[in-house]
Image (spheres, coloured by chain):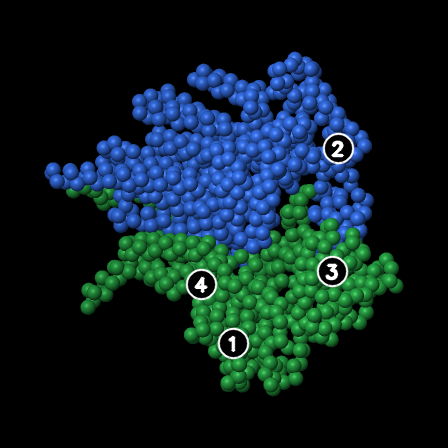
């Protein structure tokens, strides 16, 4: 038992040591981006994710380099990066439009900016936007390219790095007319009068943006005086701290370079904070976010869940108690990491962690584990915990593997969702019901496997499976009914409409109907042990539709703030394979029963 | 006979019927979500699916099934508590939904900053006809509710409106249509000129139409510090750069260029289509005359689109015939707009609009506050400060915090802003819902009922009854 603990801690400890680098102090520099303050590390990761599609860069030499190094050197050594293949384009049609080679995935900024077709594609995008229609995948790819190039250019010129809050203005009259705004309400865009007058700014200056806590921070290229010098000194220290490429001896000792950089960063932070102490984030929140980014608790959680699932599976088949205990240990460790990750995220966002698809995937897997552990303790069947760990592994791996579909970044919330009480109660209840159905799905799939292996639905094992599924479905139905109703009450309270047949609520209703049909069919005798297992798998597709399909397939309705794109082919293939599996098992079982009946 | 009735109750109360109805409800509403996605319009799904006769019929069967099964289980015992509560809850929920649907009000209200709101706009559409003999006092002569979405008129079966003289027919209805506006030759001496022009300097390159309402009046196009005037302007603001263009003949226009910097120096000349006017100001701004129509009118047409976008609206094509034998004229009207029609004796106004329900109190929007996420234009919160005419003090309506007044509830829905990002109007949804508490009671019963149902089962299921598991294979 002790060995396992030791192994676990060595594993976790390794994670932190592995990434220690001389450039680390710069990770903690607060920047303003996307409506909040965050560490430079987070901004660099998100930027590289957008442009390159990954959070680390693998150069021509085959070495993997962290996002911070890459994105900062875009600004510091732009001429080098212009000719490196760092812009990811996946859409084949877009590559066709740009006359790019199909087989390539990455392109250099220089070749894209020089591409004569790029202007045409961007015009196409602009005129498509004017129709206000939903963007199709091609247009989405064009839009991504537009923001990739804009982000790259902004990073190159230092505009992407909003590093210091502006000095607060003298308290202005709140009702005073805004001197920066146009002359009259709804006036058309003015023509610049004469050459010495700058064209109108594209982003108007809002009163609250000129000072105060929500003001736009100064970008690296807008700094003046002391701040500018301090930033330059910090950039120099950063360059010194960069790891050498191996061809020449390092200019400075890494430990010294790190200390120098730390000093330079501290100096800049002190100066930036002095500009407007109220607007500057706390050291703790920045450190927590850097830790959250680099430690990645959910990755360690799925590794532990996976180990737990393997151990429990072996323990179940071989009936070894020690292995089951080890399985439990890993499952609980994974769960602790899972909760720890949540804790960090809730601390950073200040809201329940269910405001986008990624968070809901992580949360649902958490719920699955809660139910699996409770059911396991009550029933001691082993396979319940196995199903829970397997599903949690699946969810967290999907969350890690598909960052373009399940956006991991922390984004500002729509005004209507900024009600923690309602968001917590409604969404958490609904997603917990998804967890219960997910567990029933996992149990169904495992149970069908035993039918496939020749067990009769009336045998002991399928009966216990069927019974556990029945319990999970019951819990799910109560939670889904309550959650849907709570959603109605929230909608009634906030919009004055209890039920509006919005696709999201309609699909929650359909899923509820589906499981109610299963529960009632069980009473009629239509749905026995085998039926429970098969329907637990089939009916889960309704949950998938409510959870994923409405946002990603249907893409309509009031819940538009959760909408995204992509992954339909993977989810579709997964669902199809699962249904084929159910169909095959049904076929095998019916054939077997037919043979038994004729031979008897 | 008695035996047959008994069987009917058994059938209506059967679990098998329940399963069928539940599956049918799920399938039906699933279809609804695809209809909504197809048209990108919740209203379409509501009319085609959720409020269709088929859906109502299904609901009725569901209700009958729920009642029948409770009758069938009579007399109820303790183990029936959960089952009865859940089923009564469902019936109450349906009853409450019906009350909301048939007796409630669900509409919206848009109030400009500093303005008063007096009426609620609801989903129903009306066709209203007004007539006037002197073009100033109008009397309503016809007012009827129309639902062209459900009953679209066609050229073969038009929707006919009776008039004192002449006739009015609705020939076409497009649920989603894009407005297309053209300036064409009117062939009428009483109409003004139309001018298509381009303005260009190093910052701007814009092509626009200007239409003079009549030969005696003028039309203006503003470009920030400059303006272009078509027609005889009474006075030109000396503080602004102005170009005044006046139709001279069938092909020529005379122009005057006024400079704000040098008001006394007025440049004059004559142009025709294809010529340019050098202004000499604002980065050597050039005005090019692209097309000149001496007598022009605006022609509005609508093109049908497959689905709804923020730019589309519903539109109808109306045919008006002044009197029998007269040449009919055709006009497009978008929803929430009106059309003026002339006969020899009278002027008519035909309005096609969402119904407006007057309130017996006013709401004035005093102030609108938008909070933004730092460094962005993304709204983080918004709230309206309003004064209600028969309530003392300023009220705040914000997201998740509505205002209740005299049976109506006002919810912050969204807002409109100008190009500078300053709010200009606040949009509220307004409703009155007499079914609310019935629905809430129903929900409560459903939740408690189902918890009891499953909890009770758990207690009895410690020893499963032999009947609970059927033998699967013989």
Which chain letter goes with mark 4? B
Q: Write down the residue under mark 2.
A: A272
Residue at x-position 38% and y-position 56%: B28
Tag 3 near tag 4, CB within 8 Å = no
The residues bearing labels 1 and 3 have C-alpha atoms spaced at a distance of: 42 Å
Pick whichever, B347 or A468, lies toward us.
B347
Colour given to chain B in the rendered image: green
Which chain letter goes with mark 3? B
Q: Write down the residue under mark 3.
A: B276
Residue at x-position 60% and y-position 44%: A119
Q: Write down the residue under mark 4.
A: B47
| Whether marks 3 and 2 lie on the same chain | no
Which chain letter goes with mark 2? A
Q: Earlier in the sequence, mark 1 or mark 4?
A: 4
* Image location of residue B121, percent across then percent down: 57, 66
Mark 1 secondary-structure assignment: strand
Q: Write down the residue under mark 1.
A: B319
> For the residue carrying disc 2, how many other residues have a C-alpha within 10 Å: few (<14), some (14-19), or many (20+)?
many
């Amino acid at each position: 038992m002790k060995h396992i603990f030791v192994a676990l801690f060595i594993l976790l400890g390794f994670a932190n040591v592995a990434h220690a680098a001389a450039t680390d102090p710069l990770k903690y520099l607060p920047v303003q981006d996307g409506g909040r303050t965050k560490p430079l590390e987070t901004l660099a990761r998100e930027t590289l994710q957008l442009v390159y599609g990954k959070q680390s860069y693998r150069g021509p030499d085959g070495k993997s380099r962290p996002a911070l190094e890459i994105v900062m050197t875009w600004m510091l050594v732009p001429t080098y990066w212009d000719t490196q293949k760092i812009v990811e384009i996946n859409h084949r049609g877009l590559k066709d439009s740009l006359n790019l080679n199909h087989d390539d995935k990455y392109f250099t900024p220089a070749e894209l900016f020089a591409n004569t077709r790029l202007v045409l594609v961007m015009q196409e995008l602009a005129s498509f936007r004017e129709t206000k229609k939903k963007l199709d995948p091609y247009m989405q790819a064009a839009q991504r390219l537009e923001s990739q190039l804009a982000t790259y250019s902004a990073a190159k010129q230092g505009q992407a790095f909003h590093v210091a809050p502006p000095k607060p203005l003298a308290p202005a009259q709140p009702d005073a007319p805004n001197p920066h705004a146009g002359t009259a309400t709804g006036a058309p865009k003015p023509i610049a009068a004469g050459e010495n007058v700058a064209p109108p700014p594209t982003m108007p200056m809002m009163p609250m943006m000129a000072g105060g806590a929500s003001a736009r921070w100064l970008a690296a290229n807008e700094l003046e005086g002391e701040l500018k010098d301090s930033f330059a000194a910090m950039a120099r220290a950063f360059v010194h701290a960069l790891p050498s490429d191996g061809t020449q001896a390092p200019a400075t000792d890494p430990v010294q370079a790190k200390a120098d950089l730390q000093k330079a960063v501290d100096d800049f932070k002190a100066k930036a904070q002095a500009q407007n102490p109220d607007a500057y984030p706390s050291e703790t929140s920045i450190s927590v976010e850097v830790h959250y980014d680099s430690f990645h608790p959910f990755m360690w959680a799925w590794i532990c869940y996976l180990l737990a699932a393997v151990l429990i599976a072996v323990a179940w088949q071989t009936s070894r108690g020690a292995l089951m205990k080890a399985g439990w240990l890993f499952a609980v460790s994974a769960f602790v990491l899972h909760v720890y990750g949540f804790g960090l995220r809730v601390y950073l966002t200040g809201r329940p962690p269910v405001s986008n698809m990624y968070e809901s995937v992580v949360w649902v897997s958490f719920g699955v584990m809660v139910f699996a552990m409770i059911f396991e303790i009550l029933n001691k069947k082993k396979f319940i915990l196995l199903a829970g760990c397997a599903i949690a592994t699946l969810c967290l791996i999907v969350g890690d593997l598909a960052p373009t579909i399940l956006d991991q970044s922390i984004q500002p919330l729509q005004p209507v969702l900024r009600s923690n009480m309602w968001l917590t109660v409604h969404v958490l209840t609904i997603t917990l019901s998804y967890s219960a159905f997910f567990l029933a799905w996992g149990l169904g799939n495992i149970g069908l496997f035993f039918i496939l292996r020749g067990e009769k639905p009336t045998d002991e094992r399928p009966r216990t499976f069927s019974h556990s599924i029945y319990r999970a479905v019951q819990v799910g139905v109560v939670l889904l009914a309550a959650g849907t109703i709570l959603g109605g009450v929230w909608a009634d309270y906030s919009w004055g409409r209890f039920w509006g047949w919005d696709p999201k609520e309609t699909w929650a209703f359909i899923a509820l109907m589906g499981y109610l049909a299963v529960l009632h069919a069980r009473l009629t005798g239509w749905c026995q042990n085998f039926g429970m297992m098969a329907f637990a798998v089939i009916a889960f597709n309704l949950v998938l539709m409510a959870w994923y399909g409405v946002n990603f397939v249907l893409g309509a309705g009031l819940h538009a703030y959760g909408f995204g794109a992509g992954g339909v082919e993977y989810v579709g293939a997964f669902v199809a394979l699962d249904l084929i599996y159910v169909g095959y098992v049904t076929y095998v079982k019916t054939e077997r029963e037919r043979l038994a009946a004729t031979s008897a | 006979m008695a035996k047959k009735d008994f069987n009917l109750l058994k059938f209506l109360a059967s679990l098998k019927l329940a399963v069928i109805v539940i599956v049918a409800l799920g399938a039906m509403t699933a279809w609804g979500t695809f209809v909504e996605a197809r048209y990108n319009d919740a209203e379409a799904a509501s009319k085609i699916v959720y409020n269709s006769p088929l859906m109502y019929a299904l609901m009725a069967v569901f209700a009958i099934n729920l009642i029948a099964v409770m009758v069938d289980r009579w007399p109820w015992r303790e183990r029936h508590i959960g089952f009865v509560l859940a089923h009564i809850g469902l019936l109450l929920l349906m009853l409450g939904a019906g009350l909301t649907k048939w007796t409630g009000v669900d509409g919206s209200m848009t109030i400009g900053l500093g303005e008063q709101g007096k009426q609620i706009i609801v989903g129903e559409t009306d066709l209203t006809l007004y007539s006037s003999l002197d073009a100033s006092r109008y009397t309503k002569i016809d007012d009827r509710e129309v639902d062209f979405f459900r009953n679209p008129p066609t050229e073969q079966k038009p929707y006919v409106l009776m008039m004192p003289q002449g006739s009015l027919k609705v020939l076409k209805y497009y649920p989603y249509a894009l407005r297309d506006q053209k300036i064409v030759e009117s062939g009428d001496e009483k109409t003004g000129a139309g001018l298509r022009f381009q303005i260009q300097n190093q910052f701007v390159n814009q092509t626009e139409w200007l239409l003079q309402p009549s030969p005696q009046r003028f039309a203006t196009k503003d470009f920030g510090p400059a303006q272009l005037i078509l027609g005889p302007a009474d006075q030109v603001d000396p503080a602004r750069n102005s170009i005044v263009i006046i139709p001279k003949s069938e092909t020529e226009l005379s122009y005057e260029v006024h400079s704000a910097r040098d008001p006394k120096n007025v440049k004059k000349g004559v142009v025709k289509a294809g010529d340019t006017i050098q202004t000499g100001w604002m980065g050597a701004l050039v005005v090019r005359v692209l097309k000149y129509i001496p007598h022009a009118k605006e022609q509005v047409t609508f093109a049908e689109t497959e689905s709804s976008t923020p730019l589309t609206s519903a539109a109808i094509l109306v045919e008006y015939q002044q009197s029998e034998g007269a040449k009919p004229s055709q006009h497009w009207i978008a929803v929430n707009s009106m059309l003026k029609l002339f006969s020899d004796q009278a002027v008519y106004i035909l309005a096609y609009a969402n119904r407006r329900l007057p309130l017996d109190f006013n709401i004035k929007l005093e102030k609108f506050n938008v909070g933004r996420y730092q460094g962005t234009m993304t709204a983080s919160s918004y709230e309206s400060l309003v004064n209600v005419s028969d309530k003392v003090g300023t009220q705040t309506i914000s997201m998740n915090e509505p205002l209740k007044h005299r049976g109506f509830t006002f919810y912050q829905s969204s807002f409109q802003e100008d190009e500078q990002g300053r709010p200009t109007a606040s949009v509220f949804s307004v409703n009155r819902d007499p079914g609310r508490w019935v629905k809430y009671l129903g929900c409560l019963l459903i939740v408690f009922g189902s918890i009891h149902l499953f909890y009770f089962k758990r207690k009895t299921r410690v020893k499963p009854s032999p009947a609970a598991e059927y033998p699967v294979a013989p």
